[in-house]
């Protein structure tokens, strides 16, 4: 589709949309993941469990939209192979590993060291490991995201962010003196 042309009924708005069975299987797995995230938090009051419900609900909605659009494109015969290869597979192995390991590392840091350390570390280290080399911008972004999310959850919504196992230990040991 060239500039200035509108999408026709034959090609649709996404003429290169690919709806293979592998993609639909991945989307179904994501739908299951988001559904489990929602179901595990049903019945809980307005607490920190609100965040997984919001993420799960939005994620599930987006996955359903993509599945429906893919199935409609397949039904209308709009499925074609993409002209460009998948850029993720063309990325250097180190970047692929970082992209796949970053969420796992964040979750591990979150459990051990809590929100503050995990958010600050992940927003600074992940872009650095992917090749972004502006340390001042990375540090300022990490601080802004961490403080912004803390203000949103702790101050605005009244839901304290987790301190983690190490954070709780340090608070009990050095702050909450008995």
Image (cartoon, grey):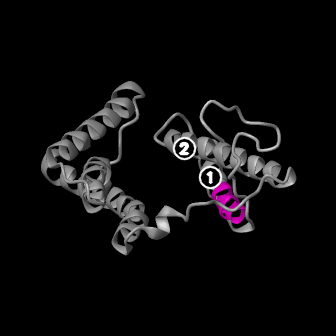
Query: Was residue 30 drawn as part of the magenta stretch in this picture?
Result: yes
Q: Which residue carries the number 1 mark?
A: 34
Residue furthest to the bottom in view is: 93
Task: Please identify the quadrant where the N terminus is shown.
Answer: top right
Badge 1: few (under 14), some or many (20 or more) residues near its Cα, within 10 Å? many
Q: Which residue carries the number 2 mark?
A: 55
Q: CA distance from mark 2 to mark 1?
A: 8 Å
The residue lying at 76 percent from left, 41 percent from top is 12
Q: Main secondary structure of the magenta part?
A: helix
Residue 150 on image: x %, y %: 32, 36
Which structural element holds mark 1?
Answer: helix
Relative to 14, residue 156 above or below:
above
Badge 2: few (under 14), some or many (20 or more) residues near its Cα, within 10 Å? some
User: Do tag 2 and tag 1 residues touch (Cβ < 8 Å)?
Assistant: yes
Residue 100 picture quarter: bottom left
Relative to 147, residue 172 above or below:
below
Q: Is residue 177 visible?
A: no
Q: Is residue 45 visible?
A: yes
Horizontal side of 64 relative to 159 (left or right) equals: right
Q: Of 108 and 176, which appears nearest the observer?
A: 108
Residue 46 on image: x %, y %: 52, 33
Upstream in the sequence, badge 2 or badge 1? Answer: 1
Query: Was residue 84 drawn as part of the magenta stretch in this picture?
Result: no
The span shown in magenta is 23-32
Residue 2 picture quarter: top right
Horizontal side of 171 relative to 1 (left or right) equals: left
């Amino acid at each position: 589709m060239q500039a200035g042309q509108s999408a026709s009924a034959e090609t649709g708005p996404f003429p290169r949309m690919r709806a293979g069975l592998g993609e639909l299987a991945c989307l179904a797995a994501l739908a299951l993941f988001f559904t489990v995230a929602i179901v595990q938090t049903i019945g809980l009051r307005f607490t920190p469990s609100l965040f997984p419900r919001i993420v799960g609900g939005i994620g599930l909605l987006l996955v359903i939209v993509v599945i429906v659009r893919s199935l409609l494109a397949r039904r209308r015969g709009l499925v074609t192979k993409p002209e460009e290869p998948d850029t993720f597979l063309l990325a250097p192995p180190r970047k692929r590993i970082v992209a796949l390991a970053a969420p796992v590392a964040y979750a591990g840091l979150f459990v051990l060291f809590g929100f503050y350390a995990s958010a600050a570390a992940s927003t600074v280290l992940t872009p650095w490991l992917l090749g972004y080399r502006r340390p001042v911008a990375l540090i300022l972004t990490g601080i802004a995201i961490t403080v912004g999310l803390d203000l949103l959850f702790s101050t605005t919504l009244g839901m304290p962010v987790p301190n983690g196992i190490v954070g709780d230990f340090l608070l009990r040991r050095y702050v909450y003196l008995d």
